[in-house]
Amino acid sequence: MNIEQSKKLSIIDFLDKENVTLKKKKGNAYWYLSPFRNEKTASFKVSKKENLWYDYAIQEGGDLVELVKRMYNKHSVSDALAFLASKDIATVDKAIETAIAAKEFTTTKMNDVQLLPLQNHSLLSYFSSRKIDITIGKMYCREIHYKVEQKHYYGIAFGNLSEGYEVRNPYFKGCIGHKNITLLAHIFKEWQNGCLVFEGFMDFLAYMTLVKQQDRWFIIENPCDYMILNSVANLKRALQYLDRYTHIHCFLDNDQAGRKTAESITNMFEYRVTDESFRYADYKDVNDYLMRKKRIINEEKKLDYDSNKS
């Protein structure tokens, strides 16, 4: 990779894949919590139009190469370029094209829709980037292909109760068909007394990956069914199904919308509800916990080693 090629890579897509917290969007301006330090008020701005960043706290900015050098302590441009070459980052043109497709998605008739077993390398790599176990991803998701105005698109498809599909790929998140919740029995056609509630299907897949990893701090030991809201806007649709359960475990996002949804479920079902967000209190959501937990543990071990060494 050379400098000119790196300038075509989207800083916004890079930050998303590096799990940097986006706080707000206003026009072409994307505001993040700075990746250089801990902060509560976003001071790190990215211009989508110019594909440049600026950190107001330190009054420095630049392109993606400069960002990588500062974030990962790369001492040379060649080191930063080698780092970027190892990443699967969308180009600016691809990000714009996908955003246009997302707008058309809701207004234009799709055709040639095909559902296949999940096998596309790019989609499987996306799972890997989110630390989702590939076998689990293949078990619950399918690969969808479709055309919009003769342009071909594809993504990961996760079904809902209305026979619609949540669709995700590295550049796009949306829905084909009618929006609804997803409800999965722990054992086929055998409903349990308990239910785990997730906001999105990536959090559900992250949880199932944690089960496979035997993360005993995180997982619920008793057998439970699984409800994925696919949007907090689907809460009203979810309530009639939740009423059948005596134990409801909420694994919702650690943001205002997630907390409000957990509060609404608790107000409705009272003592039957447990807010499980304490298990990932320092993380944005379940998938964030899965992605960052080992890195943080390793960093803590390194700090302990360095302090003992000194």
Image (tube, rainbow, N blue to C red):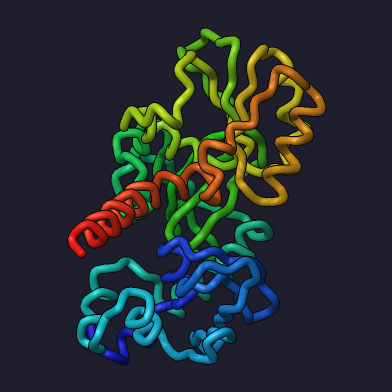
The answer to whether residue 166 is seen in the rendering is no
Q: Is residue 161 above or below residue 133?
A: above
The residue furthest top is: 190
Counting the numbered discs, the total is 0
Front residue (pair 95, 26): 26
Front residue (pair 121, 239): 239
Residue drawn at point x = 43 percent, y = 39 percent: 206
Position of 37 with respect to 88 (left or right) is: right
Image coordinates for residue 287, horizontal then vertical, percent: 46, 45
Position of 293 with respect to 166 (left or right) is: left
Front residue (pair 50, 153): 50
Image coordinates for residue 165, horizontal then vertical, percent: 55, 41
Image coordinates for residue 53, horizontal then vertical, percent: 51, 85
Residue drawn at point x = 66 percent, y = 72 percent: 25
Q: Is residue 203 above or below residue 101?
A: above
Residue drawn at point x = 35 percent, y = 34 percent: 136
Q: Quadrant of the C terminus?
A: bottom left
Residue drawn at point x = 45 percent, y = 74 percent: 36
Image coordinates for residue 229, horizontal then vertical, percent: 63, 36
